[in-house]
Amino acid sequence: MTKVRKAVIPAAGLGTRFLPATKAQPKEMLPLLDKPAIQYVVEEAVGAGLTDIIIITGRGKHAIVDHFDRSFELEHFLEAKGKFDELKQVREISDMASIHYIRQRDPLGLGHAVAAAEGHVRDEPFAVLLGDDLIVESTHLLQEMLAVHGKYGRSVLGAMEVSRDDISLYGAIEPELVENEHLARVRSIVEKPAPEDAPSNLAAIGRYVLTPEIFDCLRRTQPGVGGELQLTDAINLLAQEQAVYAYVFEGGRFDVGNKIDYLKATIELAIDRDDIGKEFRSWLGDFVERKKLI
Ligand code: UTP
């Protein structure tokens, strides 16, 4: 079986939920403390052993390319000033992995963005990590999903249970129990259903390990919800033709393209940080008390 080496990171969306901050900068570059969101995603892919990273970009996304490139001027400045810790950090970003960029000319949907990677991925299984979806490191979600792929050789979706009301924001999975409470087979999946029509409250989140047959399914998929080419619809086709699994995990996931999740992610990250965590926890405790929040 082919080992998964490639990660596709779609980052070409317009980020309309975060306007005006995303008018002139990509939402994937919004900082969570001192790192842009997409750096956490690239680090997650590299940490899971993926070595070939393909970022799907579009108009106005130069900052992403610059961020992962060498910055000789900045490096020279830091070196001259003796700021060696900062220099190390800056160099590590560009040395992290081999990163390629593919341009999605128009943001016609997540399915369309993934389809743009076909020429680079070709006939290998690959991972998809949404550039604005943050998974807390300690969950090891991607590693677990890759292990399931290693066992069955089939596609695996990252999934989590959400409330009935929230399911209309996600791809909703019709599951069939397979092995244990963490692993289900996907009978079908539907994009953003009304809560009353959802087959379950099991949602596909922004992590996928896909077999290359998905490209053929994408070619046969028509624009769906919102007039966009939906990855969910292509996965639904794939699930009718070969087994697709859902790896169910709990918590530790933030859609940082959404304001509330962005705030929650920032706070969670800050609390656990060695450098600022102690001071921040103490301030947060006082703040909650002062504002009588609980
Ligand atoms: P979203 O639906 O969250 O992105 O797509 P969006 O369209 O930018 O968000 P809003 O609703 O307008 O705020 C999830 C991921 O897929 C990428 C996005 O960049 C994001 O990382 N995406 C989406 C593409 O690469 N291309 C697209 O056409 C759509």
Image (cartoon, helix red, strand yellow):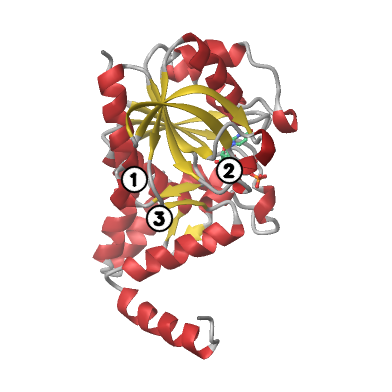
Task: List x then y, in percent, for residue 87.
Answer: 29, 59
User: Is 68 positioned to the left or the right of 87 in the image?
Assistant: right
At horizontal 70% and vertical 58% (from top left) the residue drawn is 20
Mark 3 belongs to which amino acid? Glu
Task: Choose between 246 and 146: the one closer to the eye.
Answer: 246
Q: Are marks 2 and 1 in contact (CB under 8 Å)?
A: no
Mark 2 belongs to which amino acid? Lys
Mark 1 belongs to which amino acid? Glu
Q: Which residue is mark 1?
A: 43
- N-term-proximal mark, 1 vs 3: 1
At horizontal 50% and vertical 81% (from top left) the residue drawn is 294
Task: List x then y, in percent, for residue 218.
Answer: 58, 16
Task: List x then y, in percent, for residue 170.
Answer: 59, 39
* Label 2: element kind: loop
- Specify the farthest residue to the right: 227
* Label 1: element kind: helix
Question: Is residue 84 at least partly visible in the picture?
Answer: yes
Identify whether 106 is placed above or below 292: above
Closest to the camera, between mark 1 and mark 3, is 1
User: Is 204 positioned to the left or the right of 70 in the image?
Assistant: right
Q: Which mark is residue 23?
A: none
**Alpha-carbon span between mark 1 and mark 3:** 24 Å
User: Is 153 positioned to the left or the right of 213 in the image?
Assistant: left
Q: Are marks 1 and 3 in contact (CB under 8 Å)?
A: no
- How many residues crowd around disc 2 within 10 Å: few (fewer than 14), some, or many (20 or more)? many
Q: Which residue is mark 3?
A: 73
Question: Is residue 67 at least partly visible in the picture?
Answer: no
**Alpha-carbon span between mark 2 and mark 1:** 19 Å
Q: Which residue is mark 2?
A: 61
- N-term-proximal mark, 2 vs 3: 2
Q: Can you tell me whether the CB of the residue at mark 3 lies under 8 Å from the nearest atom of ligand 1?
A: no
